[in-house]
Amino acid sequence: MADTYEGGCHCGALRYRVRALSEDVAHCHCSICRRVSGGLVMTWLSLPLDDFQWLGEEPRCYVAPTSCKRYFCGRCGAHVALVTTHSPDTVDITVTTLDQPELVRPHKHIWTDSRLPWLHLDEQLPSEAGESIAAGSFDDHAAEGLGRIE
Ligand SMILES: [Zn+2]
Ligand SMILES: [Zn+2]
């Protein structure tokens, strides 16, 4: 997939471009995703930081204690991206903010320890109780990575 892909928030203030789509797409069942989105699950597309750039306004950033920096629209509140301490060189974007979310396909469930027992979704996909990547910490590089690039 050589083309670029774009997405953005509901009001249009936040826009972004990604250089390529990846196969790394997961339904996240963690309680933080639920609280910040108000939704049952958030579905994330993981990409190298270098493949992502903001095009519109500066995002607002919420630093959730211990785990992640979450980027959202300061106007409409849409949650667009996050960078986690587990994987500071990777950005996760919300599949649902892509202009063409149907182009990617979820491949697994993560953080199923926190999964709501009455939610049934893609039951055939593999599941991870947590997330199968080593814990890390933020460095300045990761903090810069989601700043305004263009
Ligand atoms: Zn917005
Ligand atoms: Zn989550």
Image: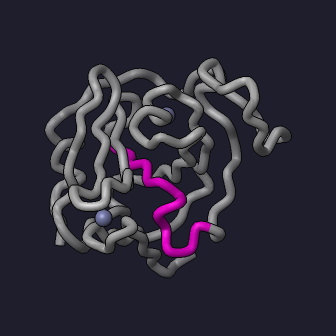
Residue positioned 40% across, 53% down in the render: 48
Magenta-drawn stretch contains 35: no
Is 90 in front, or is 64? 64
Where is residue 17 drawn, in percent x and y?
36, 71
**22 above or below 42?**
below
Q: Residue at x 31, y 42 (%)?
A: 70
- What span is colored magenta in the figure? 89-101
Residue 99: in magenta span:
yes
Expressed as whole percent of the image width and height from the top left, the position of residue 87 reads 39, 35
Residue 4 appears left or right of 114: left
Q: Quadrant of the C terminus?
A: bottom left
Q: Which quadrant, please, contains the N terminus?
A: bottom right
In this view, 34 is above or below 105 = above
User: Residue 14: x percent and y percent?
Assistant: 28, 67
**Looking at the picture, does residue 10 appear above or below residue 67?**
below
In the rendered structure, the answer to whether residue 80 lies left or right of residue 146 reads: right
Residue 4, percent from left and from top: 45, 78
Q: Residue at x 21, y 56 (%)?
A: 74
* Residue at (32% x, 38% y) in the render: 88
- In the rendered image, the residue lying farthest to the right is 124
Residue 113 higher or lower than 123, as above or below? above
